[in-house]
Image: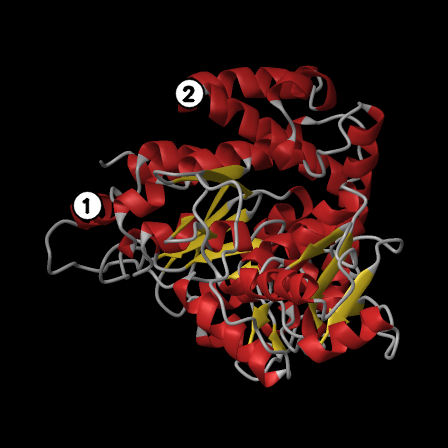
Amino acid sequence: MSEARERVRSALIASGLALPARRIIVNLAPADLPKEGSHYDLPIALGLMAAIGAIPPDALTGFTVLGELGLDGSIAPVAGVLPAAIGANVREEGLICPASCGSEAAWASPDIQIIAAQSLIQIANHFKGTQVLSRPSPKVHEAAASKLDLRDIKGQESAKRALEIAAAGGHHLLMIGAPGAGKSMLAARLPSILPPLSPGELLEVSMIASVAGEIEGGALTSQRPFRSPHHSASMAALTGGGIRAKPGEISLAHQGVLFLDELPEFDPRVLDSLRQPLENGEVSVSRANHRVTYPARFMLVAAMNPCRCGNAFEPGYACKRGRIDRCTSDYQSRISGPLMDRIDLRIEVPAVTAADLILPPPAEGSAEVAARVAAARDIQLARYADAGLPHVRTNAEAPASVLEEIAKPDAQGQKLLRDAAETMRLSARGYHRVLRVARTLADLDNADRIGRLHLAEALSYRALAEDVRQPA
């Protein structure tokens, strides 16, 4: 705030406004709440302008103000304009903000009064009536069409199937395979089969991006987020934190995809910090003077090698580090059991052979898969809306209390599930996650009831991890 004093003084002088030659005190109440950030510059400057008569004294009544000042009197963009505009609209107030953030603020409501100016002079002229600042219009960032398509991947039909199931139900996915098998290629093409954001989801995602300062030019995007942090990322970078408790990668991936490549290379403490957000869809960042809760409802997609050398799944391979099962279990035991238990789909991605690469491109691409995913998600939206759960959008989010009704298998499926639960020693969480995946498989088949085949496929995706953890 000490720097704000000099910025405000210089900006007012550059705008041709002379400050009185006496000490000026600005009271930022409540005093016990720490103030930090440059978005206080503009409200301080406008308060002084009203005090010295540069603008009418009552001009600022009923307005929320935020913006950073340049030394020349210009108004620079700041983070958090969209949630500030929504909060002002709830209080039935207008908003004064930088011109570059006006389109972002316009998404809050078509009725909110917005004054988006490029300089202090423009605001003064607007209130004096010599210049009229028109209300900005909402803008959408038109992203270029993605060139990534599932048609680019030859072979890996089982992995594509798992990718479709994960997209349809919002399930978490772990891919285990040798280097070069195509795990990263598959993950990068997941956004191409996901449906666009709904209006409600768009505002949720954009508010988080606004707080993080990641909205460019005030334009929002309807594409789902895809975040891919490096395995050296710290806990604060992943879950959120820092001096201003900014949202982390898991919140920036809200309603989208968080891709963690080389999963065992992440710090184990960082990975275990994902356990609670994976369960309840939000993360709390606590500091000594305040606590912030950010939404974090994301799809976790992870990729890893079977062992450090990556060749454990190759037939006849002899590891120089010792027995294959020992090498594999040592590497994969870096992932804790509770975290693994929260991953719905675990698949093995075999290495692609030369014969696969010679084959022509597959006939089915992302467009065909995306259509099936969208149809399955529409079924889920209607189901949970009828059940009085409009906030639940996918099967992965469904509470366990409603699974008995929406995911009730037939008689054969019930017997298979009972036997598998005893054989595989499924935890209560694992049991419910199998039901959620089976419900998604039934939705893809447009089936009202979960059958034995749906449960068998859902259990097969769970069995890989049980086998993986067996040697440990």
Q: Decide which of 382, 252 is in the foreground and name it.
A: 252
Asked if residue 307 is positioned above or below residue 423 in the image, the reply reads below
Left or right of 273, for residue 323:
left
Q: Residue at x 38, y 37 (%)?
A: 339
Q: Quadrant of residue 77?
A: bottom right
Q: Secondary structure at mark 2?
A: helix
Residue assigned mark 2: 423
Q: Quadrant of residue 353?
A: bottom left
Quick one: quadrant of the C terminus?
top left
Q: x%, y% of residue 328?
A: 23, 48
Residue assigned mark 1: 330
Colour scheme: secondary structure
| Residue 244 visible from this viewpoint | yes
Q: Secondary structure at mark 1?
A: helix
Asked if residue 431 is positioned above or below residue 464 in the image, the reply reads above
Q: x%, y% of residue 302?
A: 44, 53
In primary-sequence order, the first of circles 2 and 1 is 1
Q: x%, y% of residue 368?
A: 77, 62
Q: Decide which of 330, 418 is in the foreground and name it.
A: 330
Q: Quadrant of residue 215?
A: bottom right
**Which mark, by number, is residue 286?**
none
Q: Residue at x 58, y 32 (%)?
A: 456
Outermost residue toward the front in this view: 21
| Residue 182 visible from this viewpoint | no
Q: Real-space Cα distance between discs 2 and 1?
A: 24 Å
Asked if residue 369 is positioned above or below residue 201 in the image, the reply reads below
Q: Residue at x 72, y 77 (%)?
A: 145
